[in-house]
Image (cartoon, grey):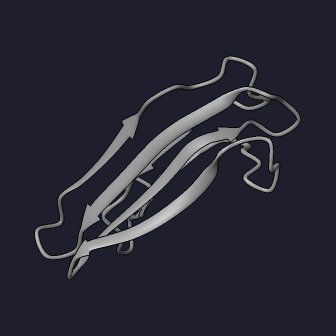
Amino acid sequence: WLCAWTDLDPSNTAGGSVYYFEPSPGVGQATWFGVFGKGTAGPNSIQITWDLGTRNWSIEYGTLSLANPQNWLTNYSPAGPSADR
C-alpha cells in the first residue's frame, strides 16, 4: 500500500489532469499534474512510481499548494497482517 492523500479535485477542468502510465511490465506510474485542491485554485503536482518486480517505489512532489483544505498524508505499508505498523 502506497499513498499520498489530500483533498484534490481532478474534475475541476480549470486545473490539471491525472495520468497513468506503465513504462514497462510490472511498473506503474501515476501523475497528478497541476491538479487543484478541492475548492481552491492552487495547483498540485505529484508522481508515484512503483515496481512490482523489485518492490521499489517513489513519491516525488513538485508544486504543492498551500491553499489545500487538507494536509498531505503519505504512507507506505508492505501489507500483511500488521499492515498499519
Compare residues 3 and 12 and report the one nearer the observer.
12
Q: Residue at x 28, y 62 (%)?
A: 50
Q: What is the tally of numbered marks visible in this picture?
A: 0
Question: Residue 41 versus residue 37: which sits nearer the camera?
Answer: 41
Q: Percent from the top left, x then y, of residue 46?
A: 47, 41
Quarter of the rendering containing residue 43: top right
Tell me which residue sits at (67%, 17%) in the image: 66
Return the x and y of residue 82 as percentages of the image width and height: 38, 65
Outermost residue on the front side: it is: 14
Asked if 68 appears above or below 17 in the picture, the reply is above
For image coordinates 35% across by 74% down, the residue present is 80
Viewed as shown, does residue 59 lie left or right of 72? left
Quadrant location of residue 44? top right
Return the x and y of residue 84 as percentages of the image width and height.
45, 56
Asked if one can make out residue 72 in the rendered structure from this viewpoint, the answer is no
Q: Is residue 66 above or below residue 56?
A: above
User: Does residue 83 lie above or below 69 as drawn?
Assistant: below
* Vertical order, 5 against 81 (above or below): above
**Residue 7 image position (x, y, % from top left):** 74, 43
Q: Is residue 36 left or right of residue 55?
A: right
Residue at the limit of the structure toward the bottom, as seen here: 25
Q: Is residue 28 visible?
A: yes
Residue lying furthest right: 39
Q: Residue at the location (38% across, 69% down)?
A: 21
- Quadrant containing the N terminus is bottom left
Q: Residue furthest left?
A: 54
